[in-house]
C-alpha cells in the first residue's frame, strides 16, 4: 500500500544521498525542510532548489537538541541521512558521538510529530559474518572493541536498536535501510565517498591507485539513482514499517577488478599503476577488513518493489564523466595555484 507523505524533514540534505533524494522528493511534489551542517555536504549540491517554494534549507547540526525547537510539528515523515563515519582512518569518538546523539534527537522529534522515521544504516553492521549474501535477519558479527574501524558499525547498530526501541515504546513507525556501496555524481572525492571515488581521482590525475590489503576483498556497488529509489519506496510503502531493508546491487566484484574497470573506462594514456597499502599503516591501532560484502535483496524486491537496474560499468561511466568535470573545475584556483576544494 502506497501512502505518500506530504511534508518531509530530511537530515543530511546537502550531502551525496540527501541531495539526490531531495531532487526526487521535490519533483514528486513533496514539501521538504532540509537540515545539514555542511561539514561534508555542499550548498552547490542543492543550489537548484534553494529558491523553491517547496523547500526550506537550515544550516544546523542534528547533534544539538535545540536544532528542532522552532520547527512546526506537522511533518509526516523524517528521513535521517546525516551521519559521521570512519571510512579507513579517522575519529572514532566523533563517529560514536555524532551518530548516537544525532539519531536520538531526530527520533525524539519524530515522536513529537508522530511522524514515520526512515533511518539510514550501513552494510558495515554485518561485520565479520561469513555468510554471503547478507540477509537482514542474519547475525551482526562485530570485531574487537580495540579495533577502531568497528566504531562506525557499532554506532549504526546502536541507532537501529534505538529506533526500534522508540517503535516499541511509542508506536513510532520505523524503517531501517542498510546501504551497500552507493556511488555516483556528487560523491565525496575521498575515502568518505568510497574506493571508486579515490580510484577515479587517482587515474584522472595520473597517480597510483591505492589498494588496501591484497585487493581481493569483494564489495557490491550501487548507483545513486537505485539507492534513492529504495529510500523513496521505503517512505511511501506502509508495509515497510517495522522492517530492515538491504538497499543495493547484488553484483559482487573484487577491489582489484574495480580498479581495472575504472582505469579502462577513464581511457587515460598511462598504464594502470597500483600501490598496495598494508592495513598496518592505517593507524596506531589494528585494522580489520571485511572479505566479502554482498546483499540479499529479496526483501527489498518483494516489499518495496525495487531492484537495482544500473549496471556497474554504466554507473561508473556516468560518475567518471561527472568527476572529470569536477576535477577540471577545481584543478586550479583563480590565481592559478592548485586547489584543495
Image (cartoon, rainbow, N blue to C red):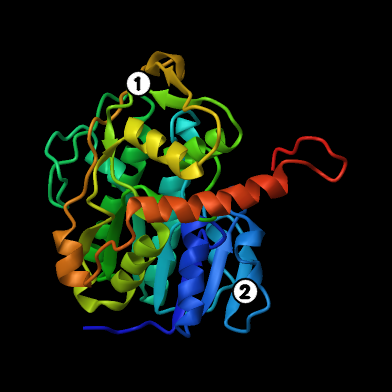
Outermost residue toward the front in this view: 269
Task: Tell me: residue 109, above or below residue 93.
Answer: below
Question: Mark number for residue 49?
Answer: 2
Task: Tell me: residue 32, above or below residue 271.
Answer: below
Residue 272 visible, this angle: yes
Tell me the residue at 31%/24% (across/down): 288
Of 39 and 206, the residue lying toward us: 206
Q: Which residue is mark 1?
A: 213
Of 147 and 161, the residue lying toward us: 147
Residue 95: where, in percent of width, then height? Answer: 45, 39
Tell me the residue at 15%/45% (across/down): 133
**Mark 1 or mark 2, whichever is nearer to me:** 1
Task: Tell me: residue 85, above or below residue 322.
Answer: above
- Say few, some or many: other residues with alpha carbon within 10 Å of mark 2 (under 14 / 14 to 19 / 20 or more): some
**At numbered mark 2, what does the secondary structure look like: helix, strand or loop?**
helix
Residue 260: where, in percent of width, then height? Answer: 39, 34
Quadrant for residue 168, please give it: bottom left
- Say few, some or many: other residues with alpha carbon within 10 Å of mark 1 (under 14 / 14 to 19 / 20 or more): some
Tell me the residue at 37%/69% (across/down): 111
Residue 264: where, in percent of width, then height? Answer: 44, 39
**At numbered mark 1, what does the secondary structure look like: helix, strand or loop?**
loop
Q: Is residue 86 left or right of residue 207?
A: left
Q: What quarter of the picture does the N terminus occupy?
A: bottom left
Q: Is residue 233 left or right of residue 294?
A: right
* Tally of marks: 2
Of 107 and 254, the residue lying toward us: 254
Amino acid at each position: 500500500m502506497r501512502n505518500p507523505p506530504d511534508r518531509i524533514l530530511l537530515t543530511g540534505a546537502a550531502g551525496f544521498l540527501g541531495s539526490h533524494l531531495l531532487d526526487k522528493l521535490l519533483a514528486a511534489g513533496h514539501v521538504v525542510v532540509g537540515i545539514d551542517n555542511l561539514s561534508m555536504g555542499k550548498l552547490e549540491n542543492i543550489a537548484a532548489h534553494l529558491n523553491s517554494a517547496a523547500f526550506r534549507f537550515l544550516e544546523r547540526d542534528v547533534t544539538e537538541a535545540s536544532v528542532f525547537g522552532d520547527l512546526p510539528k506537522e511533518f509526516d515523515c523524517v528521513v535521517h541521512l546525516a551521519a559521521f563515519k570512519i571510512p579507513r582512518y579517522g575519529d572514532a569518538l566523533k563517529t560514536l558521538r555524532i551518530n548516537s546523539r544525532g539519531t536520538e534527537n531526530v527520533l525524539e522529534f519524530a515522536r513529537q510529530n508522530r511522524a514515520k522515521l526512515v533511518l539510514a544504516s550501513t552494510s558495515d553492521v554485518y561485520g565479520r559474518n561469513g555468510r554471503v549474501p547478507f540477509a537482514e535477519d542474519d547475525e551482526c558479527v562485530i570485531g574487537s572493541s580495540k579495533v577502531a574501524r568497528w566504531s562506525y558499525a557499532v554506532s549504526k547498530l546502536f541507532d537501529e536498536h534505538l529506533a526500534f526501541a522508540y517503535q516499541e515504546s511509542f508506536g513510532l513507525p520505523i524503517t531501517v535501510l542498510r546501504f551497500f556501496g552507493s556511488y555516483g555524481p556528487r560523491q565525496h572525492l575521498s575515502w568518505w565517498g568510497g574506493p571508486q571515488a579515490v580510484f577515479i581521482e587517482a587515474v584522472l590525475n595520473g597517480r597510483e591507485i591505492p589498494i588496501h590489503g591484497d585487493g581481493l576483498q569483494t564489495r557490491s556497488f550501487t548507483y545513486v539513482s537505485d539507492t534513492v529509489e529504495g529510500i523513496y519506496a521505503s517512505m511511501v510503502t506502509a508495509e515497510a514499517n517495522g522492517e530492515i531493508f538491504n538497499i543495493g546491487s547484488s553484483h559482487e566484484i573484487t577491489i582489484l577488478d574495480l580498479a581495472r574497470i575504472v582505469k579502462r573506462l577513464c581511457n587515460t594514456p598511462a598504464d594502470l599503476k597500483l600501490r598496495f597499502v598494508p592495513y598496518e599503516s592505517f593507524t596506531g591501532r589494528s585494522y580489520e577488513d571485511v572479505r566479502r560484502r554482498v546483499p540479499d535483496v529479496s526483501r527489498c524486491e518483494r516489499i518495496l518493489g525495487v531492484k537495482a537496474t544500473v549496471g556497474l560499468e554504466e554507473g561508473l561511466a556516468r560518475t567518471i564523466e561527472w568527476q572529470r568535470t569536477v576535477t577540471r573545475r577545481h584543478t586550479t584556483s583563480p590565481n592559478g595555484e592548485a586547489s584543495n576544494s
